[in-house]
Image (cartoon, rainbow, N blue to C red):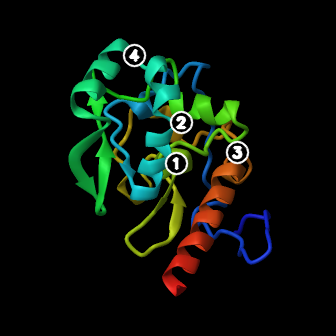
Amino acid sequence: MKSDKRSPGRRPLEVINIESARFECTFGRGCEGICCQQGRPPVDQSQQAVIDGLRPRWLPLLRPEARAVIEKDGWLSRRVKAGDKMVRVAGGWCVFFHKGCVLHTLGAEDGDSMGYKPEACALFPLEKDDHDHWFVRQHGYKKEKWSELYCLAGKKETPLASMSLAAEMDLASRLETRDAIRGGA
């Protein structure tokens, strides 16, 4: 099935398990952000520039431990995934986590809660497989190993991902269009 959201020049996003996948983020309603524990999302150079530009706004919002790590070593680690540097962790949590995602909070203040988050975080639980197909992460699907995340359990009472992930699917579609334009340039 494809997302119904359409914009000029953009195709609906194809998600291979959208008919059966279920997802609901329950952060603040039973979940305290476990997806941000040991969270080390990759961040490309354009995202790095955006996040760096927001530093005066996000630095005072961080946990003291995260702020100390960033002031000493920066917010990017030496780790690399898919050619991009990864966000640093402090005290077992993403450095941008403090009672939720600080970048999400700033984006929401500016009218786009996903606008400043690393793409991997903003798209969660959407991901691409080895064949470049989008799918919704679910326990037991494509050997999902993150069993602590009950939001990936896909229980019957959980909303269908096609409804709950409309914003994430729209973002993925926009990123696909952007990448297609970059690739064709």
Q: Which of marks 2 and 4 is in front?
A: 4
Query: Which residue is labeled 3 in the image?
Result: 164
Cα distance between the residues tagged 2 and 4: 25 Å
Q: How crowded is mark 4: few (under 14 residues within 10 Å), some or many (20 or more)?
A: some
Check disc 1 and report its element: helix, strand or loop: loop
The amino acid at mark 1 is Pro
The amino acid at mark 2 is Cys
Check disc 4 and report its element: helix, strand or loop: loop
Q: Which mark is residue 125?
A: 1
Precedes in sequence: disc 1 or disc 2: 1
Check disc 2 and report its element: helix, strand or loop: helix
Cα distance between the residues tagged 1 and 2: 9 Å
Precedes in sequence: disc 3 or disc 2: 2
Precedes in sequence: disc 3 or disc 4: 4
Cα distance between the residues tagged 3 and 1: 11 Å
Is 55 in front, or is 144?
55
Precedes in sequence: disc 2 or disc 4: 4
